[in-house]
Amino acid sequence: MHSDAGTSCPVLCTCHNQVVDCSSQRLFSVPPDLPMDTRNLSLAHNRISAVPPGYLTCYMELRVLDLRNNSLMELPPGLFLHAKRLAHLDLSYNNLSHVPADMFREAHGLVHIDLSHNPWLRRVHPQAFQGLVQLRDLDLSYGGLAFLSLEALEGLPGLVTLQIGGNPWVCGCTMEPLLKWLRNRIQRCTADSQLAECRGPPEVEGAPLFSLTEESFKACHLTLTLDDYLFIAFVGFVVSIASVVTNFLLGITANCCHRWSKASEEEEI
């Protein structure tokens, strides 16, 4: 089949009006030699486990890339180096385990990124989304995230919608900066506040993430007063004295026992 631009269309794909649809074809690898003017590429609902390095180099017009529902565990470094016009990227329903630093480097035109439903996604590097100043929608829901660095998000001035529900969040002291930023930056109506719950620690298990307040993290900011330090010093001094006295008494007792044992042996002789 041929595309409208006159270049060949990959086998099992359809090409029309700069849209290349290779979805639901049970593909194990990405199709080679796409039409050069491709704007919308769908590889969704296949069995693709890897994308070769440099795969997108020649497709300067690419705006939409749909890779959802495949078997991707990672993407090659620099995949988006030449995808400067890419605006929509869907990587949902894959097996990604982490989002490395500069994964989307040079793809400054990205507006929407969907990383949802990657159950093995455990880590997002603090610089994973660096430079994506136009990003408006970010979906990190239904993964395996227990923690997310504030640094990963605070460099996204255009972010409007953030989905983080369905993750096993550990709402300890390290989560406070992120939650504080979310309360001030993201409106409740544009975040899945009802789906985002704490998995731990036990005292907040099941609590909605956005229900936690500064009071919830009060224990993280406990500071000792001068009286507290004096009391600790006094207790330490008392414990030290008690230890010395105890050792002294044990020494005397041992010495007495030794003498008594020696006297008993002499009497028997």
Image (cartoon, rainbow, N blue to C red):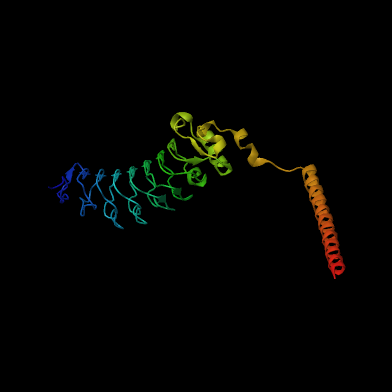
Q: Is residue 48 visible?
A: yes
Where residue 19 sits in the image (x, y, percent)? 22, 43
In the figure, residue 68 lies in which quadrant? top left
Give the answer, above or below, for where 226 lies relative to 264.
above
Give the answer, above or below, for where 139 lies relative to 252.
above
Q: Residue at x 51, y 46 (%)?
A: 149
Where residue 11 sits in the image (x, y, percent)? 15, 50
- Left/right placement of residue 22 relative to residue 77 reads left
Of all residues, the one furthest to the bottom in this rendering is: 269
Of all residues, the one furthest to the front in this rendering is: 268
- Left/right placement of residue 248 relative to residue 137 reads right
- Left/right placement of residue 174 relative to residue 47 reads right
Q: Nearer the viewer, residue 198 or 153?
A: 198
Q: Residue at x 82, y 55 (%)?
A: 246
In the figure, residue 226 lies in which quadrant? top right
Where residue 180 sits in the image (x, y, percent)? 56, 37
Where residue 48 sits in the image (x, y, percent)? 26, 50
Q: Is residue 130 visible?
A: no
Q: Residue at x 46, y 43 (%)?
A: 156
Of all residues, the one furthest to the top in this rendering is: 189
- Left/right placement of residue 208 relative to residue 14 reads right
Q: Nearer the viewer, residue 263 or 16?
A: 263
In the figure, residue 231 lies in which quadrant? top right
Give the answer, above or below, for where 11 lies relative to 177.
below
Quadrant in which the C terminus appears: bottom right
